[in-house]
Image (spheres, rainbow, N blue to C red):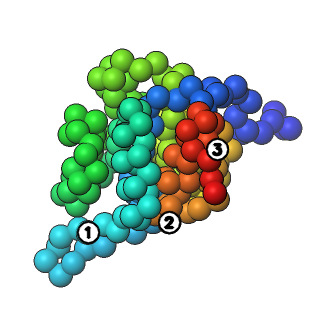
Amino acid sequence: MSGQTNQPAPRTFSDPASIELLVLDVDGVMTDGSINIDDDGRETKRFHVRDGFAMKLWLTKGYRLAIITGRSGEALKHRLRSLGLPDEMVIQGSRDKSAALDVILERTGIDVARAAHMGDDWPDLPAIERVGFPICPANAEPEVIERCALVTKRDGGQGAVREAIAQLLIAKGEYAPQ
């Protein structure tokens, strides 16, 4: 079967102005993907303050935000609570991000076509391939990049979430860059 490629079939994406729910991965999206472990074995994470500002703005405007991550940790819980994200909108330790997306969609009552998912690596693909508007940071894996409607100019952990939220709000006519 020569001549066949592993390229995904082209798909139609939802209008970014219709997005009501933004689902984020953590490592590689909200962080640069590094795992920092101190001498006592505690994991720490480094988050970009501008991403946090944009996440709070998204919530303040009445849109929904959720986190689906394969890892678990207290650092993330502290960061998300400081941003005002309810615990029920956070799924840590997910082994199946598509199933976790179903849980979030059920909790919010939002249709998958009105959801965006921002991920960077292979475990994110099952959710990315389902949502209406898939997003990834500039340094995502190539297989993720080729499936996304929006690829940010910034890398994960370097303001990519803020850039993605700004683009969604621009599409909605709710943000005008200066």
Instruction: Pinpoint residue 128: horizontal percent, then vertical percent.
Output: 53, 36
Q: Is residue 155 left or right of residue 70?
A: right
Mark 2 or mark 1: whose residue is earlier in sequence: 1
Depth check: 70 or 153 in front?
153
Q: Are marks 3 and 2 in contact (CB under 8 Å)?
A: no
Determine the CA span between mark 3 and mark 2: 16 Å
Mark 3 or mark 1: whose residue is earlier in sequence: 1
> Type of residue at label 3?
Leu
Q: Is residue 157 left or right of residue 44?
A: right
- Circle 1 packing at 10 Å, graded few (<14), some (14-19), many (20+), is some
Q: Locate the N terminus by quadrant.
A: top right
- On the image, numbered disc 1 is attached to which residue? 44
Residue sitting at 41 percent across and 33 percent down? 63
Determine the CA span between mark 3 and mark 1: 29 Å
Instruction: Pinpoint residue 158: horizontal percent, then vertical percent.
Output: 50, 66
- On the image, numbered disc 2 is attached to which residue? 158
Instruction: Pinpoint residue 178: horizontal percent, then vertical percent.
Output: 63, 57
Q: Is residue 146 visible?
A: yes
Residue sitting at 23 percent across and 68 percent down? 43
> Type of residue at label 1?
Thr
Numbered disc 2: secondary structure: loop
Residue sitting at 34 percent across and 68 percent down? 46
- Quadrant for residue 10, please give it: top right
Depth check: 49 or 107 in front?
49
Numbered disc 3: secondary structure: strand
- On the image, numbered disc 3 is attached to which residue? 150
Which residue is most to the left?
A: 40
Q: Are marks 3 and 1 in contact (CB under 8 Å)?
A: no
Residue sitting at 36 percent across and 40 percent down? 60
Mark 3 or mark 2: whose residue is earlier in sequence: 3
Which residue is most to the front?
A: 178
